[in-house]
Image (cartoon, rainbow, N blue to C red):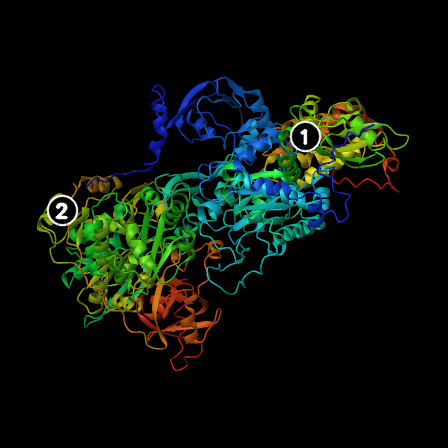
Amino acid sequence: MTVTTQGKSGAADKGSQGSDEAKTPARADEVTFTIDGVETSVPKGTLVIRAAEEIGVEIPRFCDHPLLEPAGACRQCLVEVSMPDREGNLRPMPKPQASCTLTASPGMVVKTQLTSAVADKAQHGVMELLLINHPLDCPVCDKGGECPLQNQAMSHGRPTSRLVDAKRTFAKPLAVSTQILLDRERCILCQRCTRFSLEIAGDPFIDLQKRGASQQIGRFDESVLDFEEPVDPERGADVPVGAALADESGSTFASYFSGNTVQICPVGALTSAAYRFRSRPFDLISTPAVAEHDSCGSAIRVDHRRGVVLRRLAGDDPAVNEEWITDKDRFAFAWQSAADRLSTPLVRERSVAADGTVTRGALRPASWVEALELAAEGLAAAKERGGVAVLPGGRLTVEDAYAYAKFARVALGTNDVDHRARVHSDEESAFLAHLVAGSGIGVTFADLEAAPAALLVGLEAEEEAGVTFLRLRKAAEKRGLKVFSVAPFATRGLERMSGTLLPAAPGTEAEWLDGIADGETQDPQSVALAGEALGQPGAVILVGERLAGVPGAYSAVLRLAERTGARVAWIPRRAGERAGVELGTLPTLLPGGRPVADDAARAEVAGSWGVAALPDAPGRSADDIVDALAVGQLAGAVVGGVELSDLPDPAHARRALAQAEFLVSLEVRESEVTGFADVVLPVAPPTEKSGAYWNWEGRVRPFGQALESSAMADHRVLDALADTLGAPLGLGSLDQVRAEVEGFAAWTGARAAAPAVDPVEPPAVEPGTAVLASWRLLLDAGRGQDGEPFLAGTAKRPVARVSTVTAAACQVSDGDLLTVRSDRGAVTLPVAVTEMVDHVVWLPLRSPGSAVHESLGAGPGDTVRVAAAGADVASPPVSGSDEGSLR
Amino acid sequence: MTSPLTPVLTETWDADRSWSLDTYRASGGYDALEKALGQDPGDLVQLVKDSGLRGRGGAGFPTGLKWGFLPPDDGGPRYLVVNADESEPGTCKDIPLMMASPHLLVEGVAITSFAIGCNHAFIYVRGEVLHVYRRLLRAVEEAYAAGLLGKDVLGKGYDLDVTVHAGAGAYICGEETALLDSLEGRRGQPRLKPPFPAVAGLYARPTVVNNVESIASVPSIVRHGADWFKGMGTERSAGYGIFSLSGHVKTPGQYEAPLGITLRELIDMAGGMREGHQLKFWTPGGSSTPLFTDEHLDVPLDYESVGAAGSMLGTRALQIFDETTCVVRAVTRWTEFYAHESCGKCTPCREGTFWLRAVLQRVEAGQGTQEDLDVLLDVCDNILGRAFCALGDGATSPITSSIQYFRAEYEAHITGGACPFDHSKSALFDYTPREPKALTGAGAH
């Protein structure tokens, strides 16, 4: 298989066109003009400031940002311009022009500060004016040392100030949210932050107010503007947990992208509570990396000092995340160095009684040699007594996924390997084998931007793939992308994409998809519109992993794609899902999309692995592995980064692991699995290893090791374990793994057949019950966000959403407590009455106070009982289990 | 002696209940509208082009040409917006016109709208002048009732709605694109141009923005013809205009005269300077135009001559100051106005006016230094032509021109350690000078 390790690609080719062709005559869509005596040709519509960059002339600027609309506010980028008149005579423009708002035109002659005394004086003048009210607190400012104002004041400013009068001051800082702080006196009013929140994220929360020198970025103030009183912060949905100012709509500000404003602020006015006053930029060592929190593969930069990661920034990758990342990718990194990090192998004391019964004792630290030997011994025995399965978890790098896949087949001789620590199905395996595995780069972010229409099903892009949402929104705003979403209600994310809801109760997604494919359904009209839109060239269907919980839905997606010609992209939540599909951590797939069931495929892989044969028995899925462990059909398991609470039935999984004869856990931090494991082998978190994530586009996203560490990546540990087992994998180094992965030629044999599962009739909804809808929020009780309280304060407050009709049936209104109950337990949350499908209740899947799998043993599509809290006294009260129990 | 006055806009100001529809119609009001509705709209645009009418809001851009910039009709709406946000210090022509003769404006709006193919016109009035806002509302109401606005105007099959909108009190909203943003309900700050309002103005549709006096001049041009209009004024500055005299003259007020009249003639008509005093300095077109002194008494007040003499005709707001006035004090007050009214969008205007105010307040209080004058001039140089819109440019005019003509007076403040003037002498009322404001932090480092 060919792995293309693309870092920056795609959009980079745009810039190279002009410079290579400097001598050739300009094309019709180009304009030729002169900057500082250098003639240059640029595409029509190019701004002068951008064209100057192309020829290596840097014009100082503050408000200008290539991804935001021009503002022309700071006036730092003034240049002297002459234009040819009708007769072609060059006429100087009377005033210096802002090069960030000026489009290049044929024959224009631009003189920057390098060749024009007027431009230089103008820039010096503006710089001095910017500084008169700017505090000289650079020594204590987070931005000091990497500050565009500081840098450009050095290069284009006066050495001393002529201002002898009092500077403008403000009370400091203003807490916009628990994470974002605003020091107004440092602000130079470039409006990058307000333009970002308006144009990119679509959650305007701060804007200009007052005027003149009193102008400031501030919160929405209803008392000034005579607006309605804000919504009671105790009520409503999409409200953050922590304190926050009100946004433009009067609701409390909640944004998943606010950290980007801190990064693009050209001064130290916006800072994050997590990083404020923690470090000086020149003490930091930066490593380009890839974010581990979703499947987008966003480029990030990890900054550390003396072995401690202090912050992460968005990397600049036009092809993937442009310059934006989610707040989770930015701020959630403390988990990697949490107090419960495993630093040494652990082994469990055992005592064997005379009758042979084994009693497990406590875990104790052990040497690697001892731990590996005990692990190998135990696994070998378990392999003999029923077999050992592998549950690697969904956060794997390419290299680690490959090692798990090979370890399972070669060292354990089994296809019982499944990375899906979530609701999954055999239909999904078939869908992935048929459409995704080995398909290379499919739909890309650029394709989303150019698409005329996108249908989202089983996917809430803002919550589950943040920068994908930003790209969809950009396309919707700038290029008229029509977004359709098959979901029970229109989320704030969908509204911000001006999207259309196809209101589907959980479990009916397949029916809706078939309805769109039929093209005959006219009710509602949006179905016909969606079908029509998807028929346009370039249209895409974006499928989330949650469809695995809806029998027939994946099959229906394929039918719809075939009918309309739309391309399909599968966008899972976790960073390692696609790598697992590509490299064979699924029971039905071998590396490169080779089906296990195909003799030739198995022979090819066996050949390249240098083993006689690969196991041909069909593997068990994660659910089946858990079942088999529970009844003793399987004797042991190797478990990677799996949180039991993420599994569809955590209680059942706990029973199963307790039953396992022998359990080996590879983990970064202590987890629930640690408590069941016989041998615990510590592995490295992403910052302490090199590797690559395989993002949902199919793009491989390599990253380097940020911190020096003795911790080993999973593939090294598995390699050592396999050596001890006597089945060497040859995967001890990153180069070895990559060489092997790249050595696989593309699979040319038959692809697995498309799944053809019939939809299941949704269950009837009895009075007092509702169908459960649920998905994970971006910021929730996941352990990846541990140790970051400021970020946690910006998470949305968990609420139960029901329609007016459902609320009335339960006799609850907005803000009342609603109890959602199953035979297993209950979740009680405040109600947010939402315009949504009736007889459906939505809960966040795994937020504090709403652990759906854990508390209810149920998942989306299941029927649950709903009642006002306290009304359903007959059932035993359930408490404790619905907490984020892993804290 | 025949008076040089040419009362056209001000003709009916002294009539009984001059603002009422009846009074207006009694003097031939709305005849021009009836005449215009019988003509081809293109001919009306040509008529105004031929008349040589130039924008009366200050910049003097040819009105007919502006109308001609509208792109061809694409079936969508296009708008006329009347800029009635008169707030320049010293400028006082649109507000009395709308007080005394609101129907003249309404008729002008109707004719202009018909000429440019607009079915919905807006009048953006400065919010502080509530009485004018009420008069306009009443006039529009009367016009609707009389069939002069609304559906099928005068039975000629033309529909026109007029909305009178009160601004919220920002000088910047007199800038046409800031006005449009404000009218749309946004924060009033100037827009990036292009696109110009003619292409994408109000609600991103083709829009003409004209000053009150420009629009109010249209009915008379329709009634009397382009040649009649050109017969007044100078060759390139045709027609009449309202000259607002304020300050140290005996009879301040609005004098409607042909463009090209001189201040000497105007002061004569105003009864001369205050008894026993001489002219010291004056603004030809409001505080944004560079100052003139008594050397400029005979400069013809038309666009070209005033420009050639180093200032701008602007809004013909003639603020007259005699020798009792401290020029530093006057300039400081104007600068305080600009610092207060700067919208804050761009650095030069926002920070520059803040700085100029601080320095001037200090100089006025006698705490300045010689270097301060250089700083003032250099900061002005760094604002002029560097700001986003013309507000910043205007803020520098009084400072640079006053230092040009009265540098010695500035220096007297600095060397004397205090203002050498007795302010009670320049006041036209009982006045007890106050202690200068405490200058917090001034010169502290």
Q: Quadrant of the N terminus of chain B?
A: top right
Q: Is residue A183 visible?
A: no
User: Are the residues at dot 2 and dot 1 in contact (C-beta closer than 8 Å)?
Assistant: no
Query: Considering depth in this image, is A155 or A788 the residue closer to the camera?
Result: A155
Residue assigned mark 1: B239
Tell me the kind of residue under disc 2.
Val
Rendering quarter of residue A376 = bottom left
State whether residue A772 is above or below residue A301.
below
Q: Quadrant of the C terminus of chain B?
A: top right
State whether residue B83 is above or below residue A626.
above
State whether residue A76 is above or below residue A448.
above
Residue B175: x and y in percent read: 61, 38
Q: Is residue A119 left or right of residue A585?
A: right
Rendering quarter of residue A164 = top right
- SS at mark 2? helix
Q: Is residue A102 visible?
A: yes
Q: Which mark is residue B70?
A: none
Give the farthest residue toward the bottom. Answer: A874
- SS at mark 1? loop
**Pointer 1 chain:** B
Residue A854: x and y in percent read: 34, 67
Q: CA distance from mark 2 to mark 1?
A: 93 Å
Q: Is residue A469 left or right of residue A515?
A: right
Q: Residues within 10 Å of mark 1 (few under 14, many from 20)?
A: many
**Pointer 2 chain:** A
Q: Residues within 10 Å of mark 2 (few under 14, many from 20)?
A: many
Tell me the kind of residue under disc 1.
Gly
Q: Which mark is residue A605?
A: 2
Residue A425: x and y in percent read: 23, 61
